[in-house]
Image (spheres, rainbow, N blue to C red):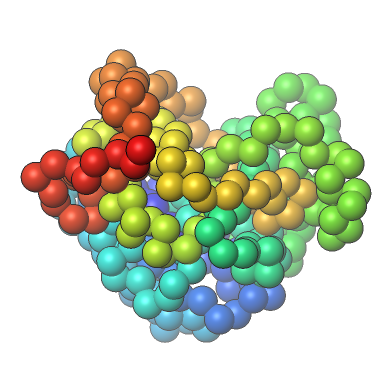
Amino acid sequence: MVAVYNAVGYLELIFAGLQRQTFRDFELIVADDGSGAEVKELVDRMKRQVSFPIQHLWHEDVGFRKNMMLNKAIGASQTEYLVFIDGDCVPHHKFLEDHWSNHTGNSVLCGRRVNLSKQMTNRLTLQTIESGDYERLSVPLLADGLLGRSSNLEDAIRIENATLRRVLHRNQVRILGCNFSVEKGLLEEINGFNEDYHAPGRGEDSDIAFRLGLIGAQFITLRYLAVLYHLYHPVTKVGEENKRIHENVMESRNPVCANGLRKLQSASPAPN
């Protein structure tokens, strides 16, 4: 599923990337947090052009309600395994294959992302996506990285050899909200995303990672697999209210949020 808010040009590139996937048995849910008519027009056109089914979920723009739309997408999904990306991220053509072929029971697969600069993002076109040119570590991209504009270029390298991946990977495993996958049942167990967050940052990744950890989910890195290209936008600052909500979640150590998939009077007691 892809969480979107306007940025119709980016979404069109994502559709082109999804159309190239080697893993074909998937549905796309567009979790639309109040975009304008252009997004609906694009989705309606893509429904007639692409080879995979699409659901478009939308609600009126009342401010940041990404977690609410993600919960609606979970409820509407027809599959038991879910992959999450954001509306500013274009997947490698083996992105879904890597998530599907590496998933195991009671696990969360955590991918990384290549951060493209404004200059490199502006070079992307439908043609460069459809041809696969965007997946190459080109001279302009490497030069852009050396200039300190694009970053995490090492995460553009896809390595199939598991032993080599283990040797190279040294970072602690963590969820990025734009690139992770999980069993639907695990999300239902923690009552989905916490809708108390009304601003971007921390609420859709750190919060859910903490609560999934409380129920014993295993976090598995997909670094050097499931490559994802993050398109440029200004850096999002985490607000103080988000920090306060997250601190309360960690202090309570309760995996079940009250304001999630189901609206609870109070979340069930934390496990002993």
Q: Nearer the viewer, residue 262 or 100?
A: 262
Q: Is residue 26 left or right of residue 112?
A: left
Q: Nearer the viewer, residue 122 or 134?
A: 134
Q: Is residue 42 left or right of residue 179?
A: left
> Residue at horizontal 62%, vertical 64%?
103
Q: Nearer the viewer, residue 5 or 186?
A: 186
Residue at the extreme front: 272
User: How far from the left and from the top, in percent, is residue 42?
Assistant: 38, 66
Q: Quadrant of the N terminus?
A: bottom left
Q: Is residue 101 left or right of residue 49?
A: right
User: How far from the left and from the top, in percent, is residue 152?
Assistant: 72, 34
- Residue 69 appears in the figure: no
Residue at the extreme left: 265
> Residue at horizontal 84%, vertical 48%?
165
Relative to 87, say whether 129 is above or below: below
User: How far from the left and from the top, in percent, is residue 196?
Assistant: 22, 36
Relative to 141, say whether 105 is above or below: below
**Res 114 → quadrant:** top right
> Residue at horizontal 73%, vertical 54%?
225
Relative to 231, say whether 15 is above or below: below
Q: Quadrant of the C terminus?
A: top left
**Res 187 → quadrant:** bottom left
Q: Is residue 140 left or right of residue 226?
A: right
> Residue at horizontal 47%, vertical 63%?
183
Q: How many marks?
A: 0
User: How far from the left and from the top, in percent, is residue 15?
Assistant: 51, 66
